[in-house]
Image (cartoon, rainbow, N blue to C red):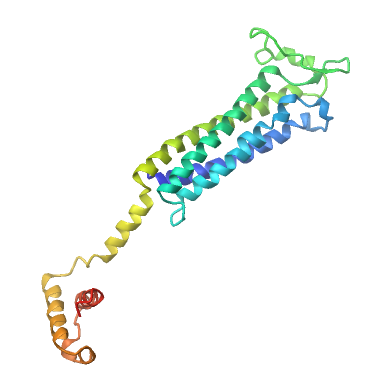
Amino acid sequence: MCTGKCAKCTGDLLFPLGLLAIVGNILLFFPNGEVWRTEEITEKIWFFPGVIGGGLLVFLPASVIRAAGLEGNCCANRCGMMLSMLMSVLGAAGALYCMIVSVVGLQDGPLCDTGDGIFIYPFLNRTTEGSYLSNQTLWIECERPQNVVLWNVVLFSILLSIGTLEAVLLLAQVVNGLIGCLCGTCMNQNQTVGNAAARRPPSGWSFCHKWAGIHKLAGLKRKSHSASWQDPALQPNSLAEVTVMGRFRDQGWV
């Protein structure tokens, strides 16, 4: 698979992943689908792991990567691949940020009311054996918002998964961009080969066809330019002669 097509595929995948990360982050602000005050929202959500890390910092590299993979685009060259490689590093840093915040959010647990009207982190600093992630019976400690533990676990897990996928894609694009920068994109090479193939004579051409065209060109050379094209004896009789004569004219031989 050529570097240009691989870059386009990577860019197309990053856009929906970034959009999902933003949606997941926004949903975290509404535990159980309800609106709560700012001081009742889990602190790690305000770091915007999905909006900034998995979203905005991924959209910009995705745009550059996709532009580098579009055939005929001004960025579909070695410089474009080098720029996509550099932007992929930025995007990978954003994805890593999303992963780290999501892991910390899962480890600390949600901010909730345990029944006394005070919002605290009841699962903070728990040992691995007593972690709420492995012991769902502890989830009942959070009374308000309802289902806040499940809400946070699911959405932070989704953000962690999205950040991991984005990091893998962007790191793969770093390698792909390096190869494209050193070796070029195969799209331009394919286009060049296609143009060269279009200029080749048809497979049915014979040596006699070409030789006849050359002889008629020699006759045209001996005559004046104005009269040469009016002489029926010097008119081409086949597609091969027309093509050969045209090429010689383009090169200034006639």
Q: Nearer the viewer, residue 71 or 61?
A: 61
Q: Is residue 154 above or below residue 216?
A: above
Residue 218 position, x and y percent, is 13, 81
Rendered location of residue 82, percent (x, y): 44, 43
Q: Is residue 14 above or below residue 70?
A: above
Which quadrant is the C terminus positioned in? bottom left
Where does the image place residue 106, in percent across and percent down from the top left? 66, 21
Q: Nearer the viewer, residue 29 or 147?
A: 29
Q: In which quadrant of the rendered view does residue 105 lie?
A: top right
Which quadrant of the figure has residue 231? bottom left
x and y, in percent, of residue 47 in the image: 70, 29
Residue at x 86% of width, y 17% of height = 118
Q: Is residue 42 above or below residue 80?
A: above
Residue 224 located left or right of residue 147: left
Question: On the picture, is 227 further left or further right than 120?
Answer: left
Question: Residue at 14% across / 74% down in the picture?
Answer: 209
Q: Residue furthest right?
A: 117
Q: Is residue 134 left or right of residue 227?
A: right
Assign the N terminus to one quadrant of the image.
top left
